[in-house]
């Protein structure tokens, strides 16, 4: 299944939803995706069925304001060029959240999110933004969280482009030994970042394509 966390226009708070045929179907269940994942595949499928049968609201996907699908509960290990970086949870944002103007390069890849079915119960696109000195300033996740059963076993082709010009390409294997050997527990995740961009300037629009995991586009320094 394909899930999102979005800002509900009816209540203003974050709500979980199922993505189906281009629509976000608001879940009637309380709680976030981390809790649903922790309950296991059967419970997640049942929650998806309830959302599809009786959504509390239906929003066309482009009109939904997406949040990070899952908010991490601990430091996020990120594998970058053979080195493991630890990203603070407070740096995690959604793909619709503003990217700091200080961002100058991006590392693009995939996050494996833990749940009741193991350390890689679901996957979502990931983009780590770095400042001029190479320090992390934000980790963008989402917008879509795809359960592992819908992710093919073959490696995913990833690409990044600016103004229709490709600036980075790479491959991330969902079955990568490091990616799937992370800790279990609600809100735990690991990130694999094989693609790096050249220098980006404020107002550049970065388009990220993560294959079956989805796409997103964000403007550097955007305050939207």
Image (tube, helix red, strand yellow):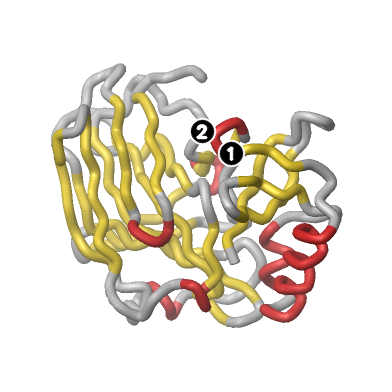
Q: Which numbered disc, 1 or 2, marks the residue that appears first in the sequence?
A: 1
Q: Classify residue 46 by image quadrant.
A: bottom right
The answer to whether residue 133 of the structure is visible from this angle is no
Residue at 30% x, 17% y: name it. 203
Report the label total: 2
Quadrant containing the N terminus is bottom right
- Secondary structure under the numbered disc 1 in the rendered image: strand
Label number found at residue 66: 1
Q: Classify residue 167 by image quadrant.
A: top left
Q: Residues within 10 Å of mark 1 (few under 14, many from 20)?
A: many
Q: Position of residue 206 (x, y in %)?
A: 29, 33
Q: Position of residue 211 (x, y in %)?
A: 34, 58
Label number found at residue 96: 2
Task: Find out whether the residues at labels 1 and 2 contact each other: C-beta distance under 8 Å.
Answer: yes
Q: Position of residue 152 (x, y in %)?
A: 39, 76
Residue at 42% x, 38% y: name it. 138
């Amino acid at each position: 299944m394909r899930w999102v966390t979005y800002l509900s226009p009816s209540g203003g708070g974050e709500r979980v939803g199922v993505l189906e045929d281009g629509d976000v179907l608001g879940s009637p269940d309380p709680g976030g995706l981390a809790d649903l994942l922790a309950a296991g595949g059967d419970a997640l499928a049942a929650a998806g069925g309830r959302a599809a049968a009786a959504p509390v609201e239906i929003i066309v996907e482009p009109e939904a304001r997406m949040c990070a699908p899952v908010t991490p509960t601990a430091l996020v290990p990120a594998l970058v060029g053979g080195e493991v970086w630890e990203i603070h949870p407070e740096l995690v944002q959604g793909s619709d959240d503003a990217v700091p103007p200080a961002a100058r390069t991006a590392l693009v890849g995939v996050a494996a999110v833990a749940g009741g079915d193991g350390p890689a119960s679901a996957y979502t696109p990931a983009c780590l933004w770095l400042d001029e000195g190479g320090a992390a300033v934000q980790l963008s996740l989402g917008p879509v969280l795809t359960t592992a059963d819908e992710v093919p076993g073959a490696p995913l082709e990833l690409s990044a482009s600016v103004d229709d010009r490709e600036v980075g390409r790479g491959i991330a294997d969902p079955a990568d030994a490091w990616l799937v050997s992370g800790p279990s527990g609600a809100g735990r995740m690991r990130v694999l970042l094989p693609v790096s961009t050249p220098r980006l300037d404020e107002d550049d629009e970065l388009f990220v394509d993560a294959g079956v995991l989805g796409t997103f586009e964000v403007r550097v320094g955007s305050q939207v």
